[in-house]
């Protein structure tokens, strides 16, 4: 399936450029601040979808627990912001000033030890990547070295998502419980709740997303990328050729998780809270469907799919909340049964030949193009 | 954690928790049985399994209503009718699912996972639209209420005993079907080597469909039993589904014995831990334990030794 001819790679670049145009120019000019913030929120999920293209689309590792890494990244960021928001001056009405409000409500009298380092921004930013990556490493090392794969791995990631959700909800003195970490205000004194700040954060998010896409593209178009496809299609044959399949799978899973975590951190910054409802089983599997709808083999498709599904979800659940679950379920089934390669596959298989037949030059394509 | 309890009290606590664990065990076994034979036979994880169970529970609820309104005299035995209805409806829904959905996806097991998840969303919303978002419960017949005193501090609930008995019967029936019937022989042949069974003249597609239907039917019975000990809501299936997956995966997919053994381990450790820790920590510890043990035995506790 993988055929990295120069022409196809150019198509992907055209797609990248069109996405950049869409999120950096068209959307900021055409929608109001509230809607733009919403788009920013969708784009944080697109990080997860890009990660899933790497580990699911190209390496064949289906993870139903990407919400765990999204959430860990988001919580690391939210912990820093929360500590800044609960300075002694802001929390002097509490019985213990200077600790987050939910800790005070749960009769904690001092900051738990694992919260203390999050007072420094450099550490928090480091932790945003490091904590999820280490968690992903432990999980994937234990699983892939023992050659647990396929459906088993999917079930175990799902169980991990369940464990983390239960843990966060159950230990509310340390984590904020089911409400999550709320009421985040400033980043080093810069108020992140104003419209101006949200604009800037939106652009930061866009740039980071495009950066992740280029990183993913770099990995996939390297020799390593070709090996990943080989692992997906015939794992045993790659192993017999002398490659350590487990190491490659561990690497790509950690990379995918780190990218998802960056999305989580941007989520906390843009939306102003983080809660277990973005960690558990249901959000994790929803993130898989974003990727599947766009096309699991296409970085461009995954981003577009995320935007479309989330936009549909918001507008559907505003008007017909009952219908949304039916539509979502139908979408799952339809994508899997009829379009396993998603919108991007539809584009390469149906629309591209049509355009070629009409005689347009491929360099001037009007729509985003997939990776394959 | 044992401070403050006398030896006798500790014994009673363990006995009571063990009994609570046995009820949980029965529910796990009933749910996992269907899932395990489907997974063992076709390598398909049915994410909508919990919803098939809830379908059975709602069928029981409806049957109990019909009995209450039209034939109140026969109410004490409504449950047996309800179980049959639940089995037939869930089984038929399972057959339809296999025909419409699953059979197109046998080559892509990960995709079945996603497609059946989509199905579970649709079923949940359908339950919510038809039966309402509130949880419903059935009224137990008189003979099933109350508890039997064993000693002066230990007593056991009759409905719990009933569910255990039911589990025993269903498990026995499945074992009998698998190891003594022609269908069971074909299933075991297909599990061992699909291609060779096909070559030997077994209609593997038909075996698949029957297995899927039977698995869903057993889920329906599980749902029926579930109404005896708890109330039913549209999303109740989700609560147990992760545990059930772990039971199946932990036990080793192709082994009936493994499923039962792992259901026993998971339910007992959970209910014993629950007494000493909070419920959520007990669950976390149990799940982590299972994940840890799976690293040691990636294919589950009981592995069928076949050449692939």
Image: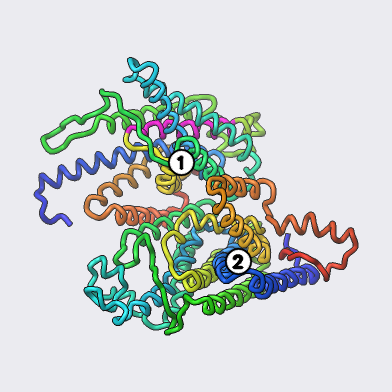
Q: Does residue A319 belong to the magenta stretch?
A: no
Q: Secondary structure at mark 1?
A: helix
* Residue B250 x %, y %: 42, 48
Numbered mark located on residue A301 in the image: none
Looking at the picture, tell me which residue is in the foreground, A226 or A52: A52
Q: Image quarter for residue B307?
A: top right
Q: Is residue B22 left or right of residue A145?
A: left
The residue shown at (50%, 55%) is: A153
Using a 10 Å C-alpha cutoff, classify the residue at mark 2 as few (fewer than 14 neighbours), some (14 to 19) or many (20 or more). Answer: many
The span from disc 2 to disc 1 (Cα, nearest Å) is 30 Å
Q: Chain of mark 2?
A: A
- Main SS class of the magenta portion in the image: helix
Q: Position of residue B294 (x, y in %)?
A: 42, 54
Q: Residue at x 68, y 55 (%)?
A: A342
Do circles 2 and 1 both sit on a common chain? no
Residue B213 lies within the magenta run: yes
User: Regarding mark 2 in the picture, which secondary structure is present there?
Assistant: helix
Q: Residue at x 37, y 80 (%)?
A: A84
Q: Which residue is mark 2?
A: A50
Chain where mark 1 sits: B
Using the image, determine if residue A143 lies above or below residue A333.
below
Q: Quadrant of the N terminus of chain A?
A: bottom right
Q: Give the magenta-colored segment's residue range.
A: B207-228
Can I make out residue A219 in this image? no
> How many neighbours does mark 1 have within 10 angstroms: few (below 14), some (14-19), or many (20 or more)?
many
Q: In this view of the protein, can residue A319 be seen by the observer?
A: yes
Give the left or right position of residue B233, taking residue A285 as reference.
left
Q: Percent from the top left, x then y, of residue B56?
A: 45, 32
Q: In the image, is residue B47 above or below residue B83? A: below
Residue B4 spot, x, y in % from top left: 10, 54
Which residue position is annotated with label 1? B50
Q: Nearer the viewer, residue B188 or A207?
A: A207
């Amino acid at each position: 399936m993988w055929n990295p001819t120069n022409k196809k790679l150019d198509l992907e670049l055209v797609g990248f450029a069109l996405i950049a145009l869409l999120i950096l120019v068209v959307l900021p000019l055409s929608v109001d601040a509230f809607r733009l913030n919403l788009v920013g929120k969708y784009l944080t999920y697109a990080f997860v979808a890009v990660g899933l293209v790497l580990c699911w689309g190209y390496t064949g590792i289906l993870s139903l627990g990407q919400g765990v890494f999204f959430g860990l990244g988001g919580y690391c960021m939210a912990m820093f912001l929360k500590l800044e928001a609960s300075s002694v001056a802001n929390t002097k009405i509490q019985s213990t000033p200077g600790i987050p409000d939910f800790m005070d409500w749960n009769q904690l009298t001092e900051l738990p030890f694992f919260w203390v380092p999050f007072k420094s921004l450099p550490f928090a930013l480091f932790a945003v990547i490091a904590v999820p990556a280490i968690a992903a490493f432990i999980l994937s090392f234990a699983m892939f070295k023992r050659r647990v794969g396929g459906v088993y791995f999917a079930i175990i990631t799902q169980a991990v998502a369940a464990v983390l959700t239960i843990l966060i909800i159950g230990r509310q003195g340390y984590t904020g419980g089911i409400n999550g970490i709320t009421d985040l205000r400033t980043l080093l004194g810069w108020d992140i709740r104003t419209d101006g700040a949200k604009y800037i954060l939106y652009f930061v998010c866009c740039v980071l997303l495009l950066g992740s896409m280029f990183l993913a593209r770099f990995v996939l178009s390297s020799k390593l990328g070709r090996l990943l496809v080989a692992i997906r299609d015939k794992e045993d044959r790659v192993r017999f050729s002398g490659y350590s399949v487990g190491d490659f799978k561990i690497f790509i899973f950690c990379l995918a998780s780190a990218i998802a975590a960056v999305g989580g951190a941007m989520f906390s910054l843009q939306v102003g809270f983080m809660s277990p409802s973005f960690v558990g089983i249901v959000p994790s599997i929803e993130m898989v469907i974003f990727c599947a709808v766009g096309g699991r083999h296409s970085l461009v498709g995954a981003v577009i799919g995320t935007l479309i599904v989330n936009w549909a979800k918001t507008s559907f659940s505003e008007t017909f909340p009952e219908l949304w679950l039916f539509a979502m379920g139908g979408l799952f089934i339809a994508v899997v049964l009829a379009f396993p390669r998603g919108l991007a596959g539809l584009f390469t298989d149906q629309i591209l030949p049509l355009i070629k037949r009409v005689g347009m030059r491929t360099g001037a394509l009007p729509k985003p193009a997939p990776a394959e | 954690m044992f401070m403050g309890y006398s030896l006798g009290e500790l014994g009673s606590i363990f006995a009571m928790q063990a009994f609570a664990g046995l009820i949980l065990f029965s529910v796990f076994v009933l749910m996992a049985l269907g899932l395990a034979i489907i997974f063992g036979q076709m390598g398909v994880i049915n994410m909508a399994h919990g919803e098939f169970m809830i379908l059975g529970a709602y069928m029981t609820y409806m049957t109990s209503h019909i009995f209450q309104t039209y034939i109140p005299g026969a109410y004490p035995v409504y449950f047996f009718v309800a179980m049959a209805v639940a089995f037939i409806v869930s089984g038929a829904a399972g057959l339809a699912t296999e025909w419409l959905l699953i059979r197109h996806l046998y080559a892509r097991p990960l995709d079945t996972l996603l497609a059946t998840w989509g199905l579970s969303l649709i079923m949940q919303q359908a339950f919510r639209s038809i039966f309402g978002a509130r949880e419903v419960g059935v009224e137990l017949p008189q003979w099933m209420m109350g508890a039997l005193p064993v000693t002066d501090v230990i007593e056991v609930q009759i409905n719990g005993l009933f569910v255990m008995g039911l589990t025993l019967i269903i498990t026995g029936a499945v074992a009998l079907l698998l190891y003594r019937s022609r269908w069971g022989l074909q299933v075991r042949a297909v599990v061992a080597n699909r291609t060779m069974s096909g070559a030997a003249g077994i209609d593997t597609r038909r075996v698949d469909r029957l297995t899927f239907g039977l698995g869903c039917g057993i889920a329906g019975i599980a749902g029926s039993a579930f109404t005896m000990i708890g109330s039913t809501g549209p999303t109740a299936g989700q609560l147990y589904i992760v545990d059930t997956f772990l039971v199946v995966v932990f036990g080793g997919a192709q082994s009936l014995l493994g499923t039962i053994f792992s259901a026993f381990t998971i339910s007992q450790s959970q209910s014993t831990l629950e007494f000493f820790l909070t419920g959520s920590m007990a669950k976390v510890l149990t799940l982590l334990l299972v994940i840890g043990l799976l690293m040691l035995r990636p294919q589950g506790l009981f592995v069928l030794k076949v050449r692939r």
